[in-house]
Image: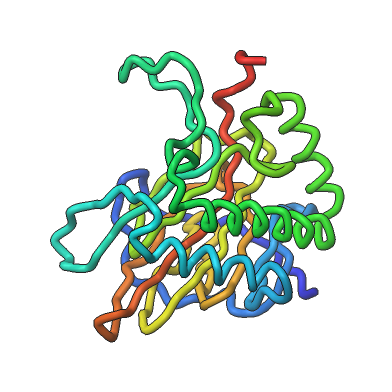
């Protein structure tokens, strides 16, 4: 697989800024290197069981069988999300302890949850095959920081589907440092929704069935506007991520 060395560039982007249109310049399978060390990778097309489970999860997610949190935006495009796996404590909401997403208690969402868990397992296998040392380190960090009941697969705590949701520039500061997210994209009849990392002027092509593994805590990043070009157009990102909120609950 091709290696791409990430080179730091100057920019004026700050957390909270909106991410404008960016043409992707990462459009082929590659491993990201920084100062000679691998930090992630990009695959244009997932295959096999992973692709099958992602298709099932995406199709189920787009039905009424899966509960969703909706977002009211002026864009006129339907935007919603669903979290599964572990939810961190939120004392300001009188929830001092972690919990498991309430979606797991919804009978009609069982097929979706099973497909997401199976997809997580298959995605982790791809991660391990391409970056075995980084994968092993992430498993170790999860074992050291997350009680077993709050783990999702071997490498994560939680997962979210983000449907037609662009994101302003941010860093995933709640993640376990040293770990990576896995982001798989489903897209149909839509453009945009590319992930842009201004520190390296890198924009990953969020093509249908693409997969990105990247340490989202390291750099400010944002998602470019999503523009459906047909009434049923959409971009859905299926994200697996490791939160650092659970260590004290061993």
Eyeballing the image, is 175 above or below 211? Answer: above
Q: How is the structure coloured here? A: rainbow
Residue 179, image quadrant: top right
Residue 118, image quadrant: bottom right
| Image position of 145 (left or right of 91) | right
Which residue is pictured at 50% across the width and 22% down the height? 98
In percent of width and height, residue 122 lies at 73, 60
Residue 32, image quadrant: bottom right
In percent of width and height, residue 144 lies at 75, 24
Pick the front one: 15 or 54: 54
| Image position of 164 (left or right of 247) | left
Which residue is pictured at 52% across the width and 77% down the height? 208
Label total for image: 0
Pick the front one: 1 or 240: 240
Which residue is pictured at 81% across the width and 55% down the height? 128
Quarter the C terminus occupies:
top right
In percent of width and height, residue 11 lies at 43, 55
Pick the front one: 207 or 118: 118
Which residue is pictured at 58% across the width and 44% down the height? 241
Quarter the N terminus occupies:
bottom right
| Image position of 188 (left or right of 249) | left
Eyeballing the image, is 119 above or below 177? Answer: below
Pick the front one: 193 or 235: 235
In percent of width and height, residue 42 lies at 65, 67
């Amino acid at each position: 697989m091709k290696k791409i060395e990430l080179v730091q560039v100057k920019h004026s982007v700050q957390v909270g800024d909106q991410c404008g249109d960016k043409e992707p310049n990462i459009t082929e399978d590659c491993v990201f290197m920084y100062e000679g060390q691998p930090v992630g990778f990009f695959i244009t097309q997932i295959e096999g069981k992973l692709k099958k489970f992602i298709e099932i999860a995406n199709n189920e997610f787009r039905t009424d069988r899966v509960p969703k949190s909706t977002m009211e935006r002026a864009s006129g495009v339907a935007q919603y999300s669903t979290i599964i796996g572990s939810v961190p404590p939120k004392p300001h909401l009188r929830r001092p302890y972690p919990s498991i997403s309430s979606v797991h208690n919804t009978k009609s969402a069982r097929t979706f949850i099973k497909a997401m868990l199976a997809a997580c397992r298959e995605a982790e296998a791809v991660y391990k095959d391409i970056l075995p040392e980084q994968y092993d380190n992430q498993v170790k960090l999860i074992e050291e920081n997350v009680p077993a009941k709050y783990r999702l697969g071997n490498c994560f705590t939680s997962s979210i589907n983000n449907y037609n949701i662009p994101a302003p520039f941010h860093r995933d500061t709640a993640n376990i440092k040293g770990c990576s997210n896995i982001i798989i994209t489903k897209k149909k009849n839509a453009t945009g929704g590319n992930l842009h990392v201004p520190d390296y002027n890198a924009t990953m092509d969020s093509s249908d069935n693409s997969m990105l593994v990247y340490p989202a805590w390291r750099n400010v990043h944002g998602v470019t506007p999503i523009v459906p070009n047909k009434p049923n157009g959409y971009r859905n990102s299926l994200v697996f991520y490791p939160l650092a909120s659970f260590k004290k609950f061993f």
